[in-house]
Amino acid sequence: MITSRKAKAVGLFSGSLDSILAFKLITEQGIQAVALNFKLPFGIAGRVPSQEQLQTLAGILGVTLITLEAGDDYLEIVRAPKYGYVLELAPCVDCRAYMLKRAKELMKEIKADFVFTGEVLGQRHFSQSRRSLRLLEKACGLEGRLLRPLSAKVLEPTLPELSGLVRRERLLDFHGKKRRRQIRLAQEYGIVDYPPPGGGCLLTDRNFASRCRDAIAHNQFNTLKEIEILHYGRHFRLPSKAKVVAGRNEEENEIISKLAGPDDLLFKPLNTKGPLVLLHAKKKTKKDIGIAARICARYCDNTKGKAVQVQCDQVILSVRPYKDEDLTPLRITPPEPTAEPSATTSKKPL
């Protein structure tokens, strides 16, 4: 028997097509929905909707948008995910659990009835398998109150369906990786402006993931402030364990200058264009300073192997630029692929 009580729900909202469609299916049943969006530290600019775009979408859907910014605690799931990495250093299952736990907190705070997502059964091999979806619900303490409107008819009925708050017959049975049905449904709803699927997380990028692994290995992955510099420049790890970051353009030079800490040393070339270079180490040796200066010289314009004047604080150094082959051992790069997957990537989530 369908109750007349006005239902309320919290939905995870990324701005993706699947999340937009999930909100349409819920709100068209007269359910009051709150869109919960997470600002994560590893989103790729241009591939995830901006706050302005999200607010516009929320307005079109007629829902309230709440954005939460992940804190330092989010980094723990990247350092040591309970359910492993899905691709490179992306802890997709743990990331989903992180968001669902906070959605549950909001559900209780606003006295909502359930939580829903735009997940589609089988769309992603690990994080959206039937077993993963079921165990995620249990791990987050949302047994019976986590609804997936796009795949509801191929999953077990949830409490809001069984109680009549949500009409199950008006939900869908989407499953698998193909998105043709989503695109067709979007056309029926008149939805034409939505981001392409996937590709929005830097942790799936081999080069960026290698920087993160290096930072984790050297205990430099504990705060959002620490990881910010991982987004910029060329990165090197010296034999002494000191870290060097070299800007790739004027914009990055300015950003690196602002991110430098009080104990960091900055190097810049004189009389020629080139990178700003940051040296980060607890103890800066003369050898580290010389290496950082030579890295700075390597990326200056028109050096042709000649000595370059590089300034570090009030000291001017005359150094010859490194050759690329000399820099190879210092670069932070992805490991060479092996026949056997690594222990971290072979661990199957859930």
Image: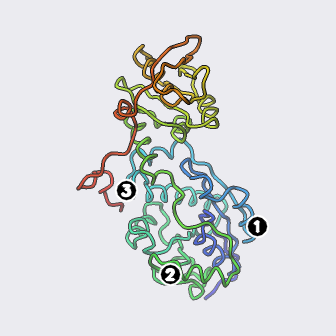
Q: Label 2 is placed on what type of residue?
A: Phe
Spatial distance from mark 2 to mark 3, Cα to Cα? 25 Å
Residue 68: x and y in percent read 63, 52
Q: Earlier in the sequence, mark 2 or mark 3?
A: 3
Q: Is residue 141 above or below residue 306?
A: below
Q: Residue at label 3?
A: 83
Spatial distance from mark 2 to mark 1, Cα to Cα? 26 Å
Q: Residue at x 40, y 35 (%)?
A: 331
Q: Quadrant of residue 273?
A: top right
* Helix, strand or loop status at disc 3: loop
Q: Label 1 is placed on what type of residue?
A: Gly
Q: Residue at x 75, y 71 (%)?
A: 60
Q: Residue at label 2?
A: 174
Residue 67: x and y in percent read 66, 54
Q: Are marks 2 and 1 in contact (CB under 8 Å)?
A: no
Residue 145: x and y in percent read 53, 70
Mark 2 or 3: in front is 2
Work out which residue is located at the far left of the displayed protein and give it.
Answer: 339
Circle 2 crowding by C-alpha within 10 Å: few under 14, some 14–19, many from 20:
many
Q: Quadrant of residue 229?
A: top right
Q: Is residue 293 visible?
A: yes
Q: Are marks 1 and 3 in contact (CB under 8 Å)?
A: no
Q: Residue at label 1?
A: 59
Q: Earlier in the sequence, mark 1 or mark 3?
A: 1
Q: Is residue 132 above or below residue 343?
A: below
Q: Is residue 5 visible?
A: no
